[in-house]
Amino acid sequence: MLRFVVIALIVIVAWVLLIKLFRDIKASKVDWKGWAIIAGFIVLAFYLRHVTGIGEF
């Protein structure tokens, strides 16, 4: 049950971020450096999880 709650929260946060991204793109005031840093941290987290095996269920 806890997994479903965590997955639901992640989906909601991702949805909100996507909506924010689309609104920023429409307004043409996208901070590409900020989005690249966020994406980099996410990719790094998944890579380190894969390499170390820490945090797997």
Image (cartoon, grey):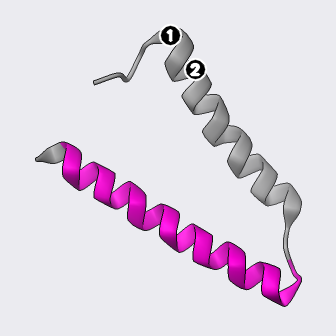
The reply, left or right, for residue 49 in relation to residue 21 is: left
**For numbered disc 2, what is the local secondary structure?**
helix
Q: Quadrant of the C terminus?
A: top left
Q: Is residue 28 above or below residue 39?
A: below
Residue closest to the far top: 52
User: Distance from label 2 to label 1 (Cα)?
Assistant: 6 Å
Residue 42 drawn at (x, y percent): 61, 41
In the rendered structure, does residue 40 fall within the stretch colored magenta? no
Q: Is residue 5 above or below residue 56?
A: below
- Apparent side of residue 33 relative to residue 51 in the rendered image (left or right): right
Residue 2's tag is none
Instruction: Give residue 48's mark.
Output: 2
Name the residue carrying label 1: 52
Query: Does residue 56 lie above or below 43 as drawn?
Result: above
Give the left or right position of residue 38, taking residue 52 as reference. Answer: right
Chief secondary structure of the magenta span?
A: helix
Q: Amino acid at mark 1?
A: Thr
Residue occupying image coordinates x 58% and y 68%: 17
Where residue 29 sits, quadrant-wise, is bottom right
Hey, which quadrant is residue 47 in on the image? top right
What residue sits 46% from the left and 64% below the top? 13
52 left or right of 25 in image: left
Q: Are marks 2 and 1 in contact (CB under 8 Å)?
A: yes
Q: Amino acid at mark 2?
A: Leu
Q: Residue at x 57, y 31 (%)?
A: 45
Q: Position of residue 33 (x, y in %)?
A: 87, 56
Which residue is located at x 52 percent, y 17 percent?
Answer: 50
Crowding near the residue tagged with mark 2, few <14, some 14–19, many ≥20 C-alpha atoms within 10 Å:
few
Q: Is residue 10 magenta?
A: yes
> As displayed, is residue 47 above or below residue 9?
above
The segment highlighted magenta reads: 3-29
Question: Horizontal and vertical percent for residue 21?
Answer: 69, 73
